[in-house]
Amino acid sequence: MSPPLKTEAIVLRSIRYGEADRIVQLYTPHHGRIGAIAKGVRRSRSRFGARLEPFFHVAVVLHQGRGDLFTVTSVHTLAAHAGLRDHGATLDAAARVCDAVARVFETSDPHPEVFLLLCNELALLSADAAHAQPANGLAFRLKLLLAAGIVPQLGACAACGETEHLQGFSAAAGGVVCASCEAAAFALDEESYRFLVAALGRPLARAPAASERALRQAERAITETAEHHAQVRLRPMMRQT
Ligand SMILES: [Zn+2]
């Protein structure tokens, strides 16, 4: 039998299973995304209590089962992020964050920087509901693309290297494109461009403000990049018109 796996984790999803069990999807710093079953978790005297609910930051001990799922044998809460549960907007934003991580990082490859980014974002949302805005959510997604190695090129035309007249965005080309390479691109306003650059460069807590039009364009750039380069469909953040 392999030795138990002791790790920190964020609970991405928690699904009822049978009479009293739960199947949880965990994101860990050194083992990526892990599926596990917690037995008897829904009994009133369960030793796991409510610690395996989504968004909890926990320390767990897992045993490798025969199938794909680990078995949870111990859970200790490191942060409950209780503030998230006070507002519909923060709950919704946190659910999108966990969903995006689960989709872009679905394997057991280690990405400790993604784990830290996820902890940071959940802590921000829990501390202040003002962060539950599209600007913050899009900045988070851009940083996820960066960690996945598919961040759009923003410094120069992704097709020809031109550094002026960057006025389109093409996921196929890999980022912003200039006026002469614009054929397969959609128009990207100067403001949207500045948002993308600032959102990548600044800490999440200081995601830049932008108009709704600019945020829509930024979302389109992020969504098309994830689809084109990672074959991942991200849940819509804003209604596209
Ligand atoms: Zn060009």
Image (cartoon, helix red, strand yellow):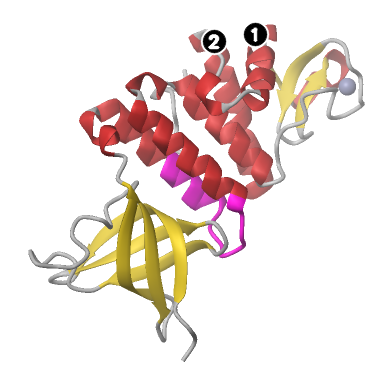
Q: Nearer the viewer, residue 131 or 61?
A: 61
Q: Is residue 179 magenta?
A: no
Q: Nearer the viewer, residue 10 or 142?
A: 10
Q: Quadrant of residue 225?
A: top right
Give the percent coordinates (x, y) of residue 146: 67, 39
Helix, strand, or loop for circle 2?
loop
Residue neighbourhood size for the residue with mark 1, other residues' Cα within 10 Å, grouped as few (<14), some (14–19), many (≥20) = some
* Residue lying furthest bottom: 1
The residue stretch that appears in magenta: 97-112
Give the percent coordinates (x, y) of residue 116: 54, 45
Q: Is residue 106 magenta?
A: yes
Picture residue at 53% right of the left edge, 58% below the top: 106
Amino acid type shown at disc 1: Glu
Q: Is mark 1 within 8 Å of ligand 1?
A: no
* Circle number at residue 210: 2
* Circle number at residue 139: none
